[in-house]
Amino acid sequence: MIVSLIAAISENRVIGVQNRLPWHLPADLQNFKKITKGKKFIMGRKSYEAADKLCSDAGNVVITRQHDYKVAGGDVTAISLQQAIEKLRGEHEVFVLGGAEIFKQAIERADNLYITLVHAKFIGDAFFPEIDTDIWSVINEADFKADDFNPYDYSFIKYGRKLAARRG
């Protein structure tokens, strides 16, 4: 199974403030939908509860320590990242959506990183882990200028795990 992380991050690695994105970037949402179409998502409970949460029609696994946590029909819970991955066994590719703690755990297990880099700095309380260039290489990158709908310059970057850094 391919495990991919997908996130929009600022230049200072902010991914959120008070459980929301600190920016509005419609092009990022369109790109997200294109990349993740038909795939299942893994996310933490706080991300699942976010006002601007993104859920998959194919199904979501919510990581929570709350054994009685209620999720929408078709979604399931897991008590760990490992259990979430096991519940999705048989899928070709799954996407990890965060939040910060889930990304921190999942980056060690990931095969790909799909990053929207927002070319600005934001104040936030949730951060994406450092992307170690000894482990990750850029597969492709596309840069875009701010426009009438997207108020910041941004880049879509796909990273792949380097062969020498393949997980066991």
Image: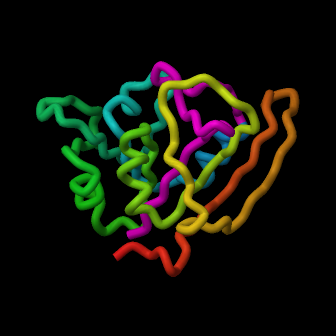
Q: Bounds of the magenta span?
A: 1-26
Q: Quadrant of residue 118?
A: top right
Name the residue at 48% across, 59% down: 4
Q: Is residue 135 magenta?
A: no
Give the camera-side residue of 57 and 52.
Answer: 52
Colour scheme in use = rainbow
Residue at point 47% right, 19% down? 18
Residue ID at (53%, 28%) = 16
- Indicate the position of residue 47 as horizontal and vertical percent values: 40, 32
Image spot of residue 129 (x, y percent): 49, 47
Q: How many marks?
A: 0
Along the line of sight, the residue nearer the viewer: 16 or 3: 16
State which quarter of the image contains the N terminus: bottom left
Across and down, in percent, residue 75 comes to 29, 42
Where, quadrant-wise, is the C terminus in this rendering? bottom left
Taking the spot 38% from the left edge, 62% from the top edge, the residue there is 109
Residue at the far left in the pictured view: 67
Whether 3 is among the magenta residues is: yes
- Residue 38 is situated, as x and y percent measured from the top left of the image, at 48, 55
